[in-house]
Image (spheres, rainbow, N blue to C red):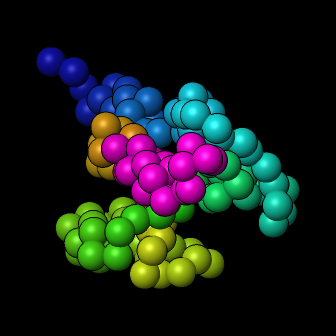
């Protein structure tokens, strides 16, 4: 049987490993077609664009890590209702953007799906010549 103090130590490490981190989010974004990264606002907000259009903003100074993704308006509201770690987009149009907090309990697969959805939403709205 594992003692409580050992579980506390390893439990916290396991929770930290299960959280998305800045490097993982960056790798996911940069692996996509026509993606560029920049710091257009300040030195702590990394912005990912597809053909010049933003699809993800990553707060490098947040703890836990958080990022903003674009979303269909109805889905944005649904996700905020369903998940406590999904908030209206910080400093963004609240109708189209959500802020995702990468806390324990926020499944990586779900977060990756939302990153992919944001990219797809922006990519599919581009004129054909930019795709």
Q: Residue 100 in the image: state x and y as whole percent.
A: 44, 59
Left of 125 or right of it: where is 72? left
Left of 57 or right of it: where is 80? left
* Quarter where residue 26 is shown: top right
Q: Is residue 103 above or below residue 87?
A: above
* Quarter where residue 35 is shown: top right
Q: Residue 115: within the magenta?
A: yes
Q: Nearer the viewer, residue 82 or 122?
A: 122
Q: Residue at x 34, y 44 (%)?
A: 113
Left of 15 or right of it: where is 34? right
* Quadrant in the picture for the C terminus: top right
Q: Residue at x 27, y 76 (%)?
A: 74
The answer to whether residue 15 shows anywhere in this view is: no
Q: Which residues are magenta?
A: 113-131
* Quarter where residue 96 is shown: bottom left
Q: Nearer the viewer, residue 128 or 30?
A: 128
Q: Residue 5: within the magenta?
A: no
Q: Residue 48 in the image: state x and y as whole percent.
A: 66, 49
């Amino acid at each position: 049987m594992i003692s409580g103090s050992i579980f506390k130590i390893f439990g916290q490490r396991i929770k930290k490993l299960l959280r998305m981190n800045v490097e993982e989010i960056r790798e996911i974004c940069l692996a996509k077609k026509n993606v560029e990264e920049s710091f257009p606002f300040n030195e702590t907000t990394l912005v990912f664009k597809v053909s010049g259009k933003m699809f993800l903003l990553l707060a490098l100074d947040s703890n836990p890590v958080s990022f903003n993704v674009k979303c269909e308006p109805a889905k944005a509201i649904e996700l905020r209702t369903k998940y406590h770690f999904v908030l209206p987009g910080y400093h963004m149009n609240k109708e189209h953007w959500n802020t995702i907090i990468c806390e324990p309990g926020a499944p990586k697969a779900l977060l990756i799906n939302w990153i992919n959805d944001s990219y797809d939403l922006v990519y599919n709205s581009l004129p054909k010549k930019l795709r």
